[in-house]
Image (tube, helix red, strand yellow):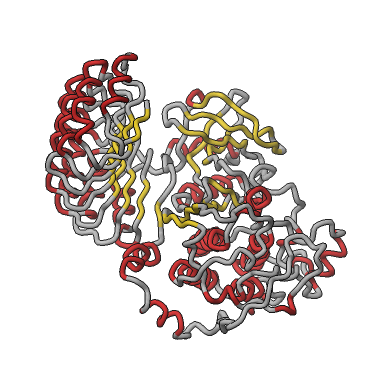
Amino acid sequence: MVAKKTSKEWLKEAISDGHIIYHDYNEFKNPEKIGEGGFGSVYKYEWKSCVMNVALKRLKVDYDDSQGFVKELILLRRISHHANIIHFHGVTEDREGYYNMVLECANDGNLRDYLKENFKKLQWIEKLSIAKEIAHGLVYLHGQKIVHRDFHSKNILIDQGRPKIADFGLSKQLDESFMTSTSNFAGLIEFVEPQCFKNPKYKRDIKSDIYSFGVILWEISSGRKPFPGSFRPSLIYTILLGKREDRIIGTPPKYIEIYERCWDNDPNKRPDTILVYEDLKQLVESSTMNRLDLQSNMFDEGPSTRKNKSQQYSINGFTFTSSQLLIPKEFMDINQSEEEPNEQPNKTTSPPIKNKARSSTLDSRQNKTSNQNKKTRSSSLDANFSKQNNNELEINGSTSNLNLSIPEEAKNVAATLNSIFTLNLKMSKLNNEGIKIISEALIDNKTLTILDIGFNKIGAEGTKSLASVLSKNRVLTTLKLCSNNLGPEGGKTLAEALRKNIKLSSLNITNNKLGPEGGKAIANALLKNTTLTSLNIGSNNLGPEGAKAFAEAINKNKTLTSLSIEKNHFGPEGGRELSRTLPNNTTLTKLNVKENDFDRATRSLLNERHSKFVKINY
């Protein structure tokens, strides 16, 4: 009789076969405890070779379905490239012999804590954007036939304002005390599908996640947990009777319709995931397209300190000031019958609003109003948002779990390029062959505008393939190539492509061992390039010769506004060269020259000679 394999044996086999990436535990340093789990503490580590923080979470590998456990990890690796899903980098074995998941570390905690800390300053456009991005991740999960089963605000992490779904599909396999709740088998009652209370054996499905998402949407609108202080058994009875949390004054009627349809007791009446996403996307689109002034007393946002001030808010790369925020007409429809007692948190009465807009429902998908509004938008707004709305799938994150040195994996990525506008392939083991496959797909691509292939192994040879893209592609605007060992020859190849490129506006080529020769080639390309506005070429050991070349570029280039040339060993000689031409430049506003071995006299000279337009960082 053949002995049954243990979980560790299945896991080692999956690692050996390349299905799961293994990372040496010595790669991680400076542990900091950030959570508790039933199988040990969870720690944040610095990943030395990747210069980033990650979370190490101990795995439970002793349950019965050992092979199923490994299949779940393989699945997690496959789907963790989405921008709104927490990224799984692989596994490592700690010094006690336990396997740990290596996960993306979200800097802003979970959604509940994020709302608690930031709710008073969040504008509705920001709340809508958070809701839409969560729905975007959920659409992707459900499209992959994955049911979360424990979906709530503590299972959504926030990293630099962007929500990321965590712990999906693994509730029976992983210890979930970190990045999830400490709830019993049913999960957090407030978010649990009501059918589970009627039938303990009820199998949760996609519509169960939709119910939970409805409660999450309400929490985003209120800034607090649902049913605080309720007695759990009585709360179950209340939910089964159809009782839900009250509407929050100031919430867009369309948004209320969405979450109330989601949390219907009858699963058959809940909308499909894609419909929820499309409605939220429409709300975000309306809020950025319809130019209506923000009224400080229109929404319940807590005490305001913004009197006569113009604050900035950034959503998906677009920056607005408080006086420019674009609010859809649907937000004006505030029903006075929905007023709540003043002692209720986050529920204040709003003044009557005249000319109420007719709210639309989830079923009225053929409503022509939105189409008429679209026709009135300015062409500049259309240009800014068309790609965002039509190409929203992102292969994103620090995707070290990808292995694009395998041609088939590179081909799989290449096949998606016509449907996305942002592609992030950092740490994906992309080599010469892989970039050749990706480049062939990019030459005639009409959608991709942002490409990040940092921390890979492209080298000088791979740069040739990428150069063909830059010479012919007409849509790519941002390219991040840091830490790819391009070398001097790669720098020269890239420089030649920059002379021909007519679209690229931002380039990051830090830490590529360009040396003086590669640096001079890039600087000389700036004499002819007329599109690049931002260049980061730090940590390339350019030396005084490179400084001289960039001094000449600064003297003649008329488009660059931001230049980072830090950590290049310019020395006093290089600093003097820069000071010679800086007064002639009228377009540069940011210049980073940190850690270039300047002496005090050189710094004084640079301070005296630079133009009044530029800000220098030492």
Nearer the observer, 262 or 287: 287
**In screen coordinates, is 72 left or right of 285?**
right
**In screen coordinates, is 595 left or right of 292?**
left
Q: Position of residue 49 (x, y in %)?
A: 42, 28
Q: Position of residue 363 (x, y in %)?
A: 55, 83
In the image, residue 1 sits, relative to residue 476, either above or below, namely: above
User: What quarter of the picture does the C terminus occupy?
Assistant: top left
**In screen coordinates, is 49 left or right of 130?**
left
Quick check: can you spot residue 480? Answer: yes
In the image, residue 493 sits, relative to residue 228, either above or below, namely: above
Which image quadrant is residue 319 in? bottom left
In the image, residue 289 sits, relative to residue 180, either above or below, namely: below
Q: Position of residue 148 (x, y in %)?
A: 60, 58
Residue shown at the point (61%, 30%) measured from the top left:
98
Nearer the observer, 128 or 266: 128
Residue shown at the point (70%, 68%) measured from the top left:
248
Residue shown at the point (58%, 35%) measured from the top left:
56
Q: Position of residue 303 (x, y in %)?
A: 68, 55
Nearer the observer, 93 or 551: 551
Which image quadrant is residue 405 in? top left
User: What quarter of the picture does the N terminus occupy?
Assistant: top right
Which image quadrant is residue 223 in? bottom right
Residue shown at the point (36%, 54%) measured from the top left:
422
